[in-house]
């Protein structure tokens, strides 16, 4: 998949890592050396699974593209995961080799020894001379990305070279990527948000990526104030952290950083629903209307607010190029009327091939050739609004279908609430009752009576929580998503 790395301007800077810069020609040469090294005399890796545990930087790009070029299946591992999580990925995918860097080698070496999997670094694998690399068809498997696994062990979603190319091309078109774009990369690189939306789109477009192994808010804000970036992509949690950080600064410094954001052509929010309150705070601070979009590991991106046109807070916009979307009701009928909720189903060249080694799960995730996302949405005035996951975010109470996300959005405006998750719990009268789990700001306390009183006039009576639990912090998975199934036992 040579075209994923832009070759139009070989001397242009592709990647900035700390004080080091790497041109497209330099990275291309390194990828070819690495691919030749992992082939070790073979003509083709023939879809052997090669995992790598490497933070954002030139080694990550070298390993990802090098495995692709050699005909292997690339498996990016979460650098922040526990050993048991790495073990699940390595064993379930039948990994034949692990690549690490100097920082991560020590943490996974013991596991690889126990599993008898060869391990080395990128530097170890760079061949002195470049050998012929295999010609790969778009249908070849290219990557396995493990799902977040909120309800069960993560499944390995397999994408082909064609799937990845389609995912990138869709976003290059929709968000008008260009060669002079510069973007910071601090998102996790074991997930499509970081791998596809930031890194791969930028390298395909011939843009420049500033790789940050971990989020450093002061350093990031200094670069923003210096007008380093033209595009910025983050999850809602990071926008909240930025807002909180900005409010601690002296007025002059805060203004310079806000102006730096204002000067960018695009700010994107994704991976979780962006609370309307955060959207509005960001707009008020920076003048930027966040572009919110919707996607998942198995499909890449499917819906997006427009690059040119109205971006509506609380909505994920319209269907992206080359993607077909339908909403399907509980009886299996296609939803034709606006305002009627249904499960999002997708057909597109971006949709993944299969779950690795799990034909049963693969089959269960498709209906008549459409991928079933499990997410419930409604179309209002031409825009999609996500109501939540069918299993955890749709609460059926007293004949109503309620969106937990909508209620959460409203409760986040409460001055005492730092975090909130809304779940449905079994109730004899209502079928399911609305229950809220909150983490509070500071040392305050909150009773159900307090919360219900505050909700009066702000939420319909049937949406107001009937039960409340106050916790120190909400449980989250590796992607920062709240693990809702673990909250229901709090009410038993």
Image (spheres, rainbow, N blue to C red):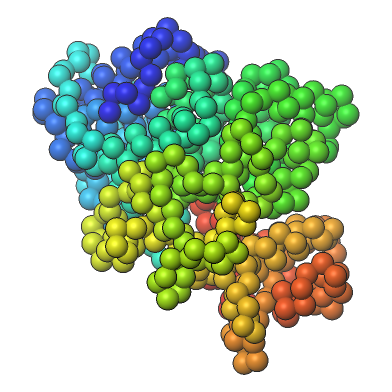
Q: Nearer the viewer, residue 275 or 30?
A: 275
Instruction: Name the residue located 47 percent from the left edge and 70 percent from the top edge.
Output: 329
On the image, the x and y values in percent for residue 363 come to 27, 63
Rendering coords of residue 226 (x, y %): 70, 17
Q: Is residue 355 visible?
A: yes
| Quadrant location, the N terminus | top left
Up/down of 232 relative to 432, above or below: above
Query: Can you say whether 25 is above or below 379 in the image?
Result: above
Splitting the image into 4 quarters, where does residue 323 fall?
A: top left
Q: Do we see residue 104 in this rendering?
A: no
- Decide: is 350 above or below 223: below
The answer to whether 284 is drawn above or below residue 368 in the figure is above
Residue, far bottom: 428
Residue 160 lies left or right of residue 419; in this view the side is left
Observer-nearest residue: 402 or 181?
Answer: 402
Give the percent coordinates (x, y) of residue 454: 86, 69
- Could you tell me which residue is drawn at 17 percent across and 27 percent down? 135
Relative horizontal placement of residue 166, taking residue 488 as reference (left or right): left
Residue placed furthest toward the front = 337
The quarter holding residue 76 reads: top left
The residue positioned 43% from the left and 12% from the top of the image is 23
Q: Position of residue 444 (x, y in %)?
A: 85, 64
| Image quarter of the C terminus | bottom right
Residue located at (16% from left, 26% from top): 134
Q: Is residue 295 left or right of residue 471?
A: left
| Labels in figure, total | 0
Residue positioned most to the left: 42
């Amino acid at each position: 998949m040579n075209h994923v790395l832009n070759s139009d301007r070989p001397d242009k800077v592709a990647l900035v890592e700390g004080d080091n810069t790497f041109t497209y020609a330099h990275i291309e040469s390194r990828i070819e050396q690495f691919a030749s090294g992992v082939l070790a005399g073979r003509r083709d890796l023939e879809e052997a699974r090669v995992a790598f545990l490497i933070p954002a930087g030139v080694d990550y790009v070298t390993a990802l593209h090098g495995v692709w070029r050699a005909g292997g299946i690339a498996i990016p591992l979460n650098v922040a995961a526990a050993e048991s999580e790495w073990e699940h990925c390595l064993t379930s995918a039948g990994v034949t080799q692990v690549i690490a860097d100097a920082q991560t080698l020590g943490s996974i070496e013991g596991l690889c020894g126990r599993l008898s999997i060869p391990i080395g670094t990128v530097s170890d694998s760079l061949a002195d001379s470049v050998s012929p690399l295999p010609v790969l068809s778009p249908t070849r498997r290219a990557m396995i990305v493990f799902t977040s696994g909120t309800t069960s062990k993560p499944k390995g979603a397999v994408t082909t070279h064609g799937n990845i190319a389609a995912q990138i091309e869709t976003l290059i078109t929709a968000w008008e990527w260009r060669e002079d774009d510069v973007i910071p990369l601090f998102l996790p690189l074991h997930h499509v948000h970081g791998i596809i939306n930031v890194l791969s789109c930028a390298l395909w477009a011939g843009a420049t990526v500033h790789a940050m192994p971990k989020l450093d808010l002061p350093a990031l804000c200094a670069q923003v104030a210096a007008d380093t970036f033209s595009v910025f992509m983050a999850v809602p949690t990071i926008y909240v952290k930025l807002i909180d950080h900005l409010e601690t600064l002296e007025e002059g410094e805060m203004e310079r950083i806000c102006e730096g954001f204002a000067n960018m052509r695009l700010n994107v929010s994704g991976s979780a629903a962006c609370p309307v309150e955060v959207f509005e705070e960001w707009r008020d601070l920076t003048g930027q209307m966040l572009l919110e979009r919707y996607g998942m590991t198995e499909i890449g991106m499917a819906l997006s607010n427009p690059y040119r046109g109205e971006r509506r807070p609380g909505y994920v916009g319209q269907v992206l190029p080359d993607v077909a979307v339908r909403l399907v009701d509980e009886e299996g009928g296609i939803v034709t009327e606006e305002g009627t909720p249904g499960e999002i189903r997708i057909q597109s060249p971006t949709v993944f091939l299969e779950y690795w080694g799990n034909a049963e799960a693969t089959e269960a995730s498709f209906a008549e050739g459409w991928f079933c996302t499990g997410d419930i949405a409604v179309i209002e005035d031409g825009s999609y609004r996500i109501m939540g996951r069918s299993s955890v975010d749709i609460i059926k109470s007293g004949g109503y279908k309620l969106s937990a996300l909508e209620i959460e959005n409203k409760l986040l405006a409460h001055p005492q609430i730092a975090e909130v998750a809304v779940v449905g719990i079994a109730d004899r009268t209502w079928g399911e009752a609305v229950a809220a789990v909150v983490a509070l700001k500071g040392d305050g306390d909150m009773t159900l009576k307090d919360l219900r009183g505050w909700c009066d006039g702000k939420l319909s009576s049937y949406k107001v929580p009937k039960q409340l639990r106050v916790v120190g912090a909400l449980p989250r998975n590796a992607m920062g998503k709240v693990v809702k199934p673990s909250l229901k036992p709090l009410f038993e």
